[in-house]
Every structure is written in structure tokens, then in C-alpha cells.
Amino acid sequence: MDAELSRRLLKLLDHVEHWLPPPPVEVDWERDVAALWQRHALGGRLLPVPPRDALSLDDLLGIERQKLALVDNTRAFLHGHPANHALLWGSRGSGKSSLIRALLNSLSDEGLRLVQVDRHDLSALPMLVEQLRPQRQRFVVYCDDLSFEGHDDAYKALKSVLDGALTGPPPNVLLYATSNRRHLLPETMSDNEGSRLVGDELHHGDAVEEKISLSDRFGLWLGFHPFNQDVYLEACCHWVSQLGHREDWNAEARAEAIRFATLRGGRSGRGAWQFATQWVGKRRLHGS
């Protein structure tokens, strides 16, 4: 009976083997500079990924102050000096995620390693951090487009890793996050009902204090704002020249770039890239 059962199980495995995923690739932090955290039923694993592109810090225009602050903070971390967790917040398309990618491209040779974790997997953040603790490299754990709804408790895992647990994050791990919201949680009029004046001081209610307490755990706040027209056009010129030739940027391109931003209702680095892609692609298609 046992032999028959074994035979049938082996036959079944032969049929389903080609449907199974390939065995996981182990991360080699001497070779790999970036990885994704993948959740599965038994916890999670790190999947090595190559850098997405060759974006450099010099490609990012209009955010000089933010670049300098984040590079200085990251270099201090890489050299074993005190450094802060960082929250990059502000307008959509203004360069928050691009700055993280450019940071990796620029500082990976100095020892920076990046691990991206999805917001929905933050409950496993303590497990991920413990996997990184014994490594000799220095890691930025990065969460893109981070925000929470009022009923979402996933932010508690993030709070704990940032500043709440007894052990705290290891010295070789920093957390960087990007968000459109400065306080990461939705803010409503009712939140202010508990606020009161004590003398000349405004004391926030419990709801506001709870929401501020999360973003307050990031020691470095960097705000990103919409571009003015001059900076937007400078970015358009840069990307048109990068994707095509310097001669592709002319008076006609400038006028079309302004029209492009007007139709989209805003100016941003992302908008400049998208305009340049459209403009250069159209000119090459028609042989210009």
C-alpha cells in the first residue's frame, strides 16, 4: 500500500512540477545592490533585482536642497555616523521616488544597499529588519507611496521598528519612505475637535497626536513642491537633450512643453520627462 501511494504521489508531482515557481535566488550582497521583499505564506524572502535605470542625481533638477540633505544623511549613515530615518513627502511627480533611485545609483559603490518593501507587507517589517541585522552591509529599507487609511493598523509595525521596540532598528538599517501626505494618515475636520488652547499654546487632541506620532518618528523631513515654469522648462530641456539631441529643444518645443503642462494641470519633473518622451518620440517617428 505504501509503495502504491508513493508511486501515485511521484506521478502527481511529475504532472505539476512545471507549474511550480523556480527555486528562489539567494541574495548576494557583495554583488546585488537592491532587493524586493516578497511576502509568502511562511513569512517572506528577499528577491535580488538590478537597478531600474541609470538615473543620476544630476538628472534631477529643481530639488537641490532635498538632494543635498538626503545625500549628506545617507553618507553619514554609510560611514557609521548618526543619521536619521527620512520621509520624502509632497506633490506627485516631484522627484521623491526618483531621488531614491538616483541615490542608489550614486552611492552603491560606497556600500549602500536598498531593500524595497510594499506598504501592504509592513506587518513583516520586524522580520525583514532582523534578517538584515547580521549583515555587514548598510541598508536603506524603502517604502514607496506610503500612506494609511484610518482603519489601517499596518502603520503600528512601522512605528515599532522606527522608534517603539525595545531593541530598535539595528545600526546598519535606515528607513526611507515617500508619500503624498506629510503625516501619512488621512486628516479630517473632526480630528481637530479635541484641540484646545492652554494659555497661548495650542494642544492637539488624541486623534491629531496619534497621526503626528508616526511621521514624527522620521528625523528628516523633506518637502517636494510643484515646479515653477522656469524650473519645469529647464527639466524639459534636460530630458529632451538626454532622450534626443540638444537641437530638439527649440522655440516650438518650449511652446509645446507649456501647453503639455497646462493640459495636465501642473508642472513637475515627471511631467517634464513625459513631455520629452512624447516630443522626441514624435520627431523621430516623422524623421525630424
Image (cartoon, rainbow, N blue to C red):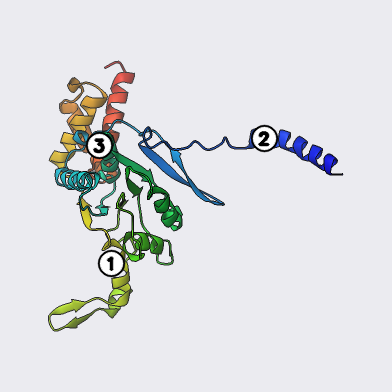
Q: Position of residue 257 (x, y in %)?
A: 22, 34
- Tag 3: amino acid: Glu
Q: Position of residue 151 (x, y in %)?
A: 43, 67
Residue beneath disc 1: 212
* View extreme (top): residue: 287
Q: Element under label 1? A: helix
- Asked if 32 appears above or below 70 in the picture, the reply is above
Residue beneath disc 2: 17
Which dot, 3 or 2, sits closer to the camera?
A: 3
* View extreme (right): residue: 1
- Tag 1: amino acid: Ile
- Tag 2: amino acid: Glu
| In this picture, residue 44 sits left or right of residue 106 | right
- Asked if 145 appears above or below 210 in the picture, the reply is above
- How much space separates mark 1 and mark 2, taking CA atoms? 50 Å
Query: Which residue does the image show at 23% across and 27% down from the upper left?
Result: 240
Q: Position of residue 68 (x, y in %)?
A: 16, 44
The mark tally for this picture is 3
- Residue 52: name its quadrant: top left
- Asked if 121 appears above or below 240 in the picture, the reply is below
| In this picture, residue 9 sits left or right of residue 80 | right
Residue beneath disc 3: 110
Packing grade of label 2 (10 A; few <14, some 14-19, many >=20) is few
Tag shown at residue 94: none
Q: Element under label 2? A: helix
Q: Element under label 3? A: helix
| In this picture, residue 288 sits left or right of residue 246 | right
Quadrant in which the C terminus is drawn: top left
Q: Earlier in the sequence, mark 1 or mark 2?
A: 2
